[in-house]
Amino acid sequence: MSDRLHDEIRRRRTFAIISHPDAGKTTLTEKLLLYGGAIHLAGSVKARRAQRHATSDWMAMEQERGISVTSSVLHFDYDGFRVNLLDTPGHQDFSEDTYRTLVAADAAVMLLDNRKGVEEQTRKLFEVCKLRRTPVFTLVNKCDRPGEDPFQLLDDVERDLGVSCYPITWPITDAGRFLGVYDRVRDRILLFESSGDHGASQVRTRELGLADPETDELLGPSVAERLREEIELLDVAGTDFDREGVSEGRVSPTFFGSALTNFGIEPFLHSFLELAPAPPPREARPEPIAPERGSFTGFVFKIQANLDPKHRDRIAFLRVCSGRFEAGLQVKNHRSGDTVRLSQPQSFIARDRQAVEEAWPGDVVGIHDRGALRIGDTLYHGDPVEYGGIPRFSPEHFAKVGVEDPLRRKHLDNGLRQLSEEGAAQVFYAESIAGPAPMVGAVGPLQFDVLLHRLEHEYGVRARLERLPYTSARWVEGPEREIARVAAGYDRTLVEDSKGQPLILFQTEWSLQRTIEKERDVLHFHSAAP
Ligand code: G4P
């Protein structure tokens, strides 16, 4: 293996932020870029506002600029590391892409609002990380204003998510004012000095030891005493720091900070980069692939469509898993057996695209695709390899699809097939007297608007959606007779996915859970396609 490959792998950190809308993901992303030197803050606050507006208004944006605004990938350098931040769509554009992005990440940062703790979208995303045993780091944000007691907050997180939190930094506050953090690993108190420019520049800190007499002077005796007591409590009652637990996703290193004022962000970034894994080996057939494998391999985890609707031009996001990626390389697509030329590869900084000549394991590159690639495709050079593929996640919104003009039914089927292959929505079929009736499922409801829009503009089909009352779906395995019996209940229905695998859709979570419990000796239920 070349030294260069080894060095590039060792310094790569590829992660995603998981959070509920409003926890501060946009602000944190911006601050990470600030510390990474990738942006100067002057214009970026405005850009952020514009971006937030844009993501909540997909259609207008799409029409105006002819592109779809879904997740992007950012990279920056910090302290010798090359950091790849995979942006997970949140807000209303929460979709399957949000989940798929996690499959391409080697770690996740769970960002929590200090008043709200774990919220719904965080929980769903955390579950995906847990399933994949992705290391999760916790950052409690907005500590510049009073929030829940940190002991209570972490207790709630642990109980809710079944993970053990290990505070690496601990907040120091005085009557609701955020003064600094104590770094337990380095045994340093970091006191923040406000720059007075509302977080537009990096924050200056002053370092002290916990036992320093100066600490009492600077913090005041009561704050210093409380801090020492709290740290003692953590040391005595808390778990030991378990690096293996972190890499298996059982222990979450935890930090406190404020993305708005930058307080605590640098100590977080510093420890995070040190503790987060470099690209690990990945499950594949015939055997797991180490990133150090000399020849290139990677997989497609996202396809961004209709950069130009007339040409069905798309960008496939490729996660490099091993070897060196070179522009123009001829590789094989394992699924289709086709040879693919990796032409015009691009990397992304915010919304700007740049041509890339080479990339390394952990990096994400966008490649032009004219319809040959699908989500989950493995591309390789050298000996054949196939990565595990990207699971289809259970949708939570369902609708029946109809066409206004019955003569367009073929176009509808064709459009639905292509859009589902691309991962824009999931398509199911229910038995009806007139033959299989198409149905679509989505993780976020905005996917439906996007689907209708694209069916009309790309496939010339004006479709109608009729929302259905189901809220969850499970792929089901077992004897056909038993599946039919269980699916006959009044608040559920049986459908098939595009590969003919059966699913049962349920109206309520309660009914779903009860059924799983009751039928567990007969049927197996899966929340992602088996
Ligand atoms: P999101 O991407 O996770 O949805 O969150 P975003 O960064 O857009 O932040 C949501 C709101 O929370 C914003 O306020 C933002 O300024 C605020 N915020 C983010 N980090 C912090 C923090 O560390 N402390 C405090 N106090 N607030 C924080 P907004 O009023 O909705 O928008 P804006 O007018 O400030 O842009």
Image (cartoon, rainbow, N blue to C red):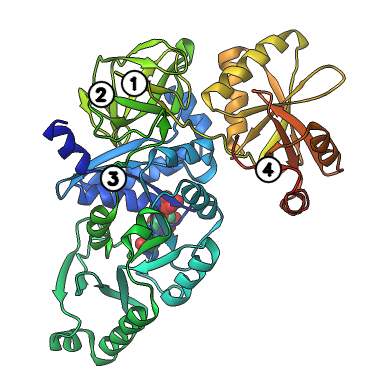
Q: Amino acid type of disc 2?
A: Ser
Q: Position of residue 43 (x, y in %)?
A: 26, 44
* Mark 1 surroundings within 10 Å by alpha-carbon count, few (fewer than 14), some (14 through 19), many (20 or more): many
Q: Which mark is residue 380?
A: 1
* Inter-mark Cα distance, 3 to 2: 39 Å
Please report the residue visible at 54 percent of the width from the left and 43 percent of the height from the top. 92
Q: Which residue is more in the foreground, 319 or 176?
A: 319
Label pair 2/1, CB-CB below 8 angstroms: yes
Q: Which mark is residue 44?
A: 3
Q: Is mark 2 within 8 Å of ligand 1?
A: no
Query: Can you tell which quarter of the image residue 344 is in?
Result: top left
Q: Nearer the viewer, residue 387 or 180?
A: 387
- In this rendered view, identify the residue nearer to me: 465 or 391: 391
Badge 4 is on which residue? Answer: 525
Q: Position of residue 261 (x, y in %)?
A: 29, 62
Residue toward you, 456 or 492: 492
Label 4 beta carbon less than 8 Å to ligand 1: no
Residue at mark 2 to residue at mark 1: CA–CA distance: 8 Å
Q: Earlier in the sequence, mark 3 or mark 4?
A: 3
Q: Are marks 4 and 2 in contact (CB under 8 Å)?
A: no
Mark 1 falls on what kind of element?
strand
Earlier sequence position, callout 3 versus callout 2 = 3
Asked if labels 4 and 3 touch by Cβ distance under 8 angstroms, the answer is no
Callout 4, which amino acid? Phe
Residue 476, compared with residue 298, is above or below; it is below
Q: CA distance from mark 1 to mark 3?
A: 38 Å
Q: Name the amino acid, label 3.
A: Ser
SS of the residue at dot 2?
loop
Image x and y of residue 182, in percent = 25, 74
On-image quarter of the N terminus:
top left
Q: Is residue 68 above or below residue 8?
A: above
